[in-house]
Amino acid sequence: MSEKTFQAFYVEEQESGAFTSGVKKVPFSFLPDHEVLIEVHFSCLNYKDALSASGNKGVTRSYPHIPGIDAAGVVVEDVSGKFDEGDSVLVTGRDLGSNTSGGYGRFIRVPNDWVVPMPDGLDAKQAMTYGTAGFTAMYGVKRLQRELIEAGNGKVLVTGATGGVGSMAVFFLSQLGYKVIAATGKMEKKSFLETLGAAEVIHRDKVTDVKESPILSRQWQGAIETVGGEMLDAVIRQAGHDGAVACCGNILGHELHTNVYPFILRGVSLLGIDSAICKTLLRLEIWDTISEMPHQKLPESYSHVVGLNELSGEIEKILNGEQSGRVVVSHQK
């Protein structure tokens, strides 16, 4: 009798060193030996998923592999007894889709402490419209709030504003009453960002094309900075007194060359966001806050749904910087 299989977007490394990917049937024995078996209904596409699907060994150490750092669905079995069969749940971050088979498979098997009950007010598709991008953005909002960067205290900058994290940050901040400056290299997306709630849309060069002075005139009180490198340095140097910058990206580089003056003369705080490894209580709080957002205010065009067989084209788009908004991956399409 043949072994039971499930459908997945499967990435393999060839003897030549090249990587190939496609939809195929995978045996259940491919899944790791963890407590909770989940049938995945929806996942989504993140830049990290695209790297994993392309054979990036910095994200995924060994292949074959099933990417997908996000998953939402229902519990099939939990040998630990923490969850019941049929419970609606979601999993984001941790090691899912990096070195543990991820949400681009119809089934995942994960440790029970990775699993979050689906919050009231969210269904699986909505949860994956947000996914790790939304989770990271809301984590950044909460880090700013912890530093008393509140609506009404000044402008908040969001860089990489058309990307997944950036666009979600624009939406969340605007819905919470903040005046948002959205910085982007895609000024043709200005109306898209205004629809999400941006009060002002500027070209990213306006942030970085500044004097090399150790400290610059104040332009924003807080920032969610998603691209790193010279952008992060410029954002820090233009933050206001007692300002804060939450950072989570490195597309422009992983090194930060800056100086101490914004920190010791203005009391600026630099805040890291690690959404993959986030304490459980904070993880639950973040998802509860996301569930309270007015989902109906997201433009209908903000996300679109694809099936596994359409993923390759979407992965190419995100790697080439051609994507805005969110791609939701359906196992039912």
Image: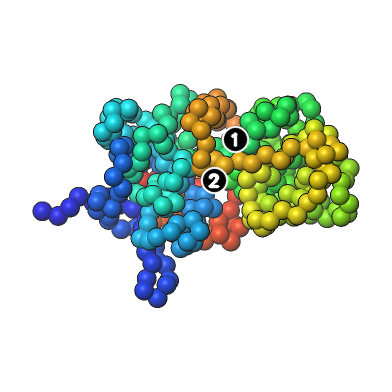
Q: Is residue 82 above or below residue 276?
A: above
Q: Residue at x 87, y 46 (%)?
A: 215
Of residues 211 and 290, the one nearer the viewer is 211
Residue 217 image point, x, y percent: 89, 42
Q: Residues within 10 Å of mark 2 (few under 14, many from 20)?
A: many
Task: Find residue 150 and report its image quarter.
Answer: top right
Q: Residue furthest left?
A: 1
Q: How is the image coloured?
A: rainbow
Q: Tally the marks.
A: 2
Task: Find residue 293 and report its image quarter.
Answer: top right
Q: Which residue is mark 2?
A: 326
Kindly identify which numbered label has been placed on residue 244.
Answer: none
Question: In the figure, is residue 19 to the left or right of 176?
Answer: left
Task: Find residue 317 and report its image quarter.
Answer: bottom right
Q: Which residue is mark 1?
A: 139
Q: Nearer the viewer, mark 1 or mark 2?
A: 1
Viewer can see residue 12: yes
Question: In the figure, is residue 319 to the left or right of 243?
Answer: left
Viewer can see residue 204: no
Residue 308 image point, x, y percent: 39, 53
Q: Residue at x 80, y 32 (%)?
A: 242
Of residues 30 and 130, the one nearer the viewer is 30
